């Protein structure tokens, strides 16, 4: 894992125009988002407690969505286990300006639950509720085919995400 300052230096060395840059919560910061956007890229960065105010806004948006909000569900079965993942994307109008977070358009969340022989594993070990802050051009709509995006002006192919 690259430290944030090292990751910024690496971005200066590579061409990311039209590419999707992903990163963990260590790299979810204003400088990283700004650098990626300046170089013509898109991003999907894990969002955790290191961006407390941004995470709070993301949680509020997810809390306000209706039960009918589109989601995408995937299930993997194998070796006596079933892992179900439910992905949700919500647009975040005005959040980028409020937090001075360049290019932020949406938040994504994946909730994963693993069951073994019909029993849910402990929440501590397998239940995940990860959020990401994302630039919209690269975020697939939850119920659309792979590669579909929120913005019709998409130039970045969506390759999916996992947590």
Image (spheres, grey):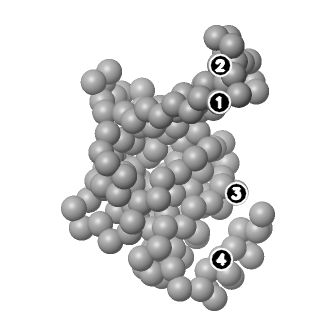
Looking at the rendering, which quadrant does residue 66 occupy?
A: top left
Q: Residue under circle 1?
A: 78
Q: Residue under circle 2?
A: 115
Q: CA distance from mark 3 to mark 4?
A: 12 Å
Please name whichever residue, 110 or 107, is drawn nearer the observer in this view of the structure.
110
Q: Tell me which residue sits at (37%, 33%) in the image.
A: 71
Please name whichever residue, 69 or 78, is drawn nearer the observer in this view of the structure.
78
| Residue farthest toward the bottom in the current orientation of the protein | 13
Q: Earlier in the sequence, mark 3 or mark 2?
A: 3
Q: Residue under circle 3?
A: 26
Q: CA distance from mark 1 to mark 2?
A: 11 Å
Q: Earlier in the sequence, mark 4 or mark 1?
A: 4
Q: Secondary structure at mark 3?
A: helix
Q: CA distance from mark 1 to mark 3?
A: 32 Å
Return the x and y of residue 40 as percentages of the image width and height: 43, 79
Return the x and y of residue 151 as percentages of the image width and height: 26, 59
Name above or below for residue 29 compared with residue 121: below
Relative side of 100 to 2, left or right: left
Q: Residue under circle 4?
A: 8
Q: Residues within 10 Å of mark 1 (few under 14, many from 20)?
A: few
Q: Earlier in the sequence, mark 1 or mark 2?
A: 1
The N terminus lies in which quarter of the figure?
bottom right
Return the x and y of residue 149 as percentages of the image width and height: 31, 55
Q: Residues within 10 Å of mark 2 (few under 14, many from 20)?
A: some
């Amino acid at each position: 894992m690259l430290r944030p300052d090292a990751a910024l230096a690496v971005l200066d060395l590579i061409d990311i125009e039209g590419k999707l840059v992903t990163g963990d919560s260590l790299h979810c910061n204003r400088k990283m988002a700004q650098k990626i956007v300046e170089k013509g890229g898109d991003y999907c960065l894990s969002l955790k407690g290191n961006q407390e105010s941004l995470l709070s806004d993301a949680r509020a948006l997810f809390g306000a969505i209706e039960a009918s909000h589109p989601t995408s569900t995937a299930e993997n079965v194998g070796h006596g286990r079933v892992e179900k993942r439910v992905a949700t994307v919500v647009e975040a109008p005005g959040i980028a300006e409020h937090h001075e977070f360049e290019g932020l358009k949406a938040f994504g969340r994946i909730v994963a639950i693993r069951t073994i022989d019909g029993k849910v594993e402990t929440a501590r070990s397998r239940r995940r509720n990860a959020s990401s802050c994302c630039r919209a051009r690269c975020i697939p709509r939850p119920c659309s085919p792979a590669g579909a995006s929120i913005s019709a002006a998409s130039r970045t192919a969506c390759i999916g995400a996992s947590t």
